[in-house]
Amino acid sequence: MSPLPPSIADAGVLGFLDAPAWLARKALVRVGRIILALQLIAVLPAAAGQFLTIRGTAGQDYLAVGLGYALLYGGSLLGMAMTAVALSAATWGMEQCLRGRPFTTGDALRWALRFDRLLTTLLVQFVIVMGAAFCVVPGLAAAMYLGLSVPVMAAEDLTGGRAIDRSIALARHGRNGPWFTSTGAYALALVCVFTLLNYSVGSLSTLPAAVIGGWLGIRAAVEGGDATGAMTTLPVWVMVSLSVSAAFVYVLSYLYLVAGGVLLRRRAQELTEGIDILEAIPTPAGPASEEDRP
């Protein structure tokens, strides 16, 4: 594995986009398990709700349908909370990996679950998602200027308005800098790569279910049954495997996004304040030189 270059302030977009892949591989196990555990907690209730809703509708079991919808909506709210915790904990863990510091999953979760940190992450996440819902462009602008808030919180221990203000200042390369900088452009590039990973790999993970559903539909049509209701006959193991595979896709895409955010904050700090990107990363002490020896 190639080491992180001493400075990536002058790296091109493609060169910079390769750096998160390096860091994501380095933190795959230690940070990936945090995201995977929280994502499984989030997706399983929603998957159970979807299963109950489909089967209840097919069998006209309205109690199962009601319970299914309750699990679906409750799972959506739980998913939002788990996404915020996973993003915060993974970002802190990624920062520790970059600095070469040991940590446990419990350390990352305890750090992320402090109220002010969780509230900051939820607020930033809500603004970006709501912005994306309004014609996408406001969401991209929010990602450009607020996207460094969680990395700032992990590296500089700022929360709330101070973390958001610091994120905007880094995105502009200074409080009075231009509104569009290379940091903002790289933030947009990271979002594009994350979206591509999430949807392209996610589509591959749902392909087996689509093939099985299509085969069941064809068989039902040949036998004179209801082809449109084929999805209701999907085996339970298919539904569970879909949820698990979706969680793994989430882990891979978010690992890249989190690593990119951590590195982008360091790059923006280097450009804004002239601080070398590896200045705060401790390195093992080498053998003493002749001058240092007593």
Image (cartoon, helix red, strand yellow):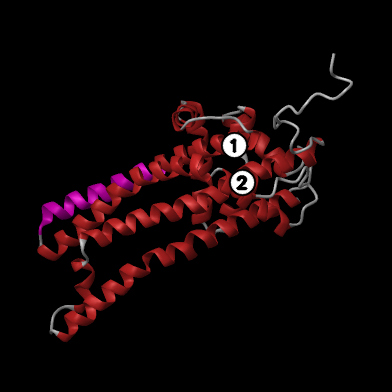
User: Closer to the N terminus: mark 1 or mark 2?
Assistant: 2
The extreme right residue here reads: 291
- The residue shown at (85%, 25%) is 289
Q: Which residue is mark 2?
A: 23
Q: Is residue 20 above or below residue 237?
A: above
Q: Is residue 217 above or below residue 243?
A: below
Q: Height in image: 172 above or below 207?
A: above
Q: Secondary structure at mark 1?
A: helix
Distance between the alpha carbons at the discs numbered 1 and 2? 8 Å
Kind of residue at disc 2: Leu
Judged left or right of residue 290, residue 78 is left
The number of numbered discs placed on residues in the rendered structure image is 2
User: Outermost residue toward the top?
Assistant: 294
Residue 231 location, quadrant: bottom left
Residue 168 coordinates in the image, percent (x, y): 68, 40
Instruction: Report whether residue 43 is seen.
Output: yes
Report the magenta residues as a range: 61-80
Q: Nearer the viewer, residue 290 or 168?
A: 290
Q: Which residue is mark 1?
A: 97
Label 1 amino acid?
A: Cys
Q: Are marks 1 and 2 in contact (CB under 8 Å)?
A: yes
Q: Residue at x 42, y 53 (%)?
A: 248
Q: Residue at x 56, y 51 (%)?
A: 256
Give the position of the C terminus as an image quadrant. Answer: top right
